Image (spheres, rainbow, N blue to C red):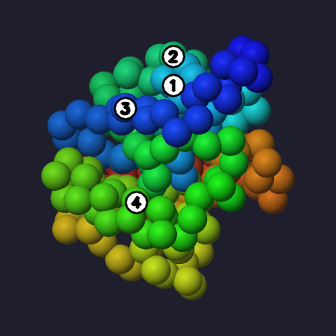
Amino acid sequence: MTPAELEAARDRLVPDVVGDGLRVLFCGINPGLMTAATGHHFARPGNRFWPALHASGFTPRQLHPSEQSQLVRYGLGITNVVARASARADELSDEEYREGGRILAEKVLRLRPRWLAVAGVTAYRVAFGDKKAKIGPQTRTIGDTRIWALPNPSGLNAHWTLPAMAEEYGRLRAAAEADG
C-alpha cells in the first residue's frame, strides 16, 4: 500500500464486526489508516491483536484481518471508541473520546455483549471518565455488560510483550467462559 493510498483513507469509517449473542465485543481506540484502507480491523503489520487473540485461546488458529467476519461464529466482535481513521491515536481529541464513549455505551446497550473489552486503557480512561482504571476487569458496567481494559495491541506499545498480552487476553477469555 502506498503512502498516498494510506493518506486517502484518513477519516474513513470502518464497519463494526458484530452479531447477536456476542460473548466479547473487542473495542479498538480508532481505526488506523491501514485498517481504513483495507476495511479490516487491526490490519497493520506488527499489530498484535490477531496473534494475541489466538494465543489466548479465543480462536482455534490465528485469523488474518481479512477473515474478521469469522469472529462472530466464536461469539466475538470488533468496534472502536472513535469511528474515524487517523494515522495516530494522538490525533484524536478528548472530546472525540468522550463522544465515542457515549456512542459506544449506546451500541453496547443495543448489542448486549457479555463483555466489552477496550484495547487501550488510556482510551478507556478518557472515554468513560475513569482516570484510575487499570488493565483488567472494571467495576463499571454498561447495562448487564461487564468491561475489561486490555493493553493496546499496537506494535508501538512496547510495555507489553505478545506473551504478556496473550496472558491478559486469556484472563478475559476465562472470565467470559465462566459467565456461561
- Residue ID for mark 1: 40
Image position, residue 86 (x, y; %): 61, 43
Q: Earlier in the sequence, mark 4 or mark 3?
A: 3
Residue 153 at x, y percent in the picture: 66, 46
Question: Separation of disc 4 and disc 3 at Cα?
Answer: 15 Å
Kindly give the residue lying farthest to the right in the view shown: 158
Q: Identify residue for label 4.
A: 100
Q: Hey, what amino acid is under mark 1?
A: His
Q: Which quarter of the figure has residue 79?
A: top left
**Residue at the (51%, 25%) spot, across then down:** 40
Q: Name the element at disc 2.
A: helix
Q: Which residue is mark 3?
A: 15
- Please say if 76 is above or below 45: below
| Foreground label between 1 and 4 | 4
Residue drawn where x is 57% and y is 65% of the image: 93
Q: Between marks 2 and 1, how big is the CA–CA gap?
A: 6 Å
Residue in view at x 48 percent, y 33 percent = 12
- Amino acid tagged 2: Ser
Q: Which secondary structure lies at badge 4?
A: helix
Of residues 109 and 33, the one drawn nearer to the viewer in this rendering: 33
**Mark 4 or mark 1, which is nearer the start of the sequence?**
1
- Kindly report which numbered mark, 4 or 2, lies closer to the viewer in this rendering: 4
Q: Nearer the viewer, residue 140 or 167?
A: 140
Vertically, is 149 above or below 119?
below
Which residue, given by chain and number where applicable, does mark 2 sit on?
66
- Can you tell which of label 2 and label 3 is closer to the viewer? 3
Q: Secondary structure at mark 1?
A: loop
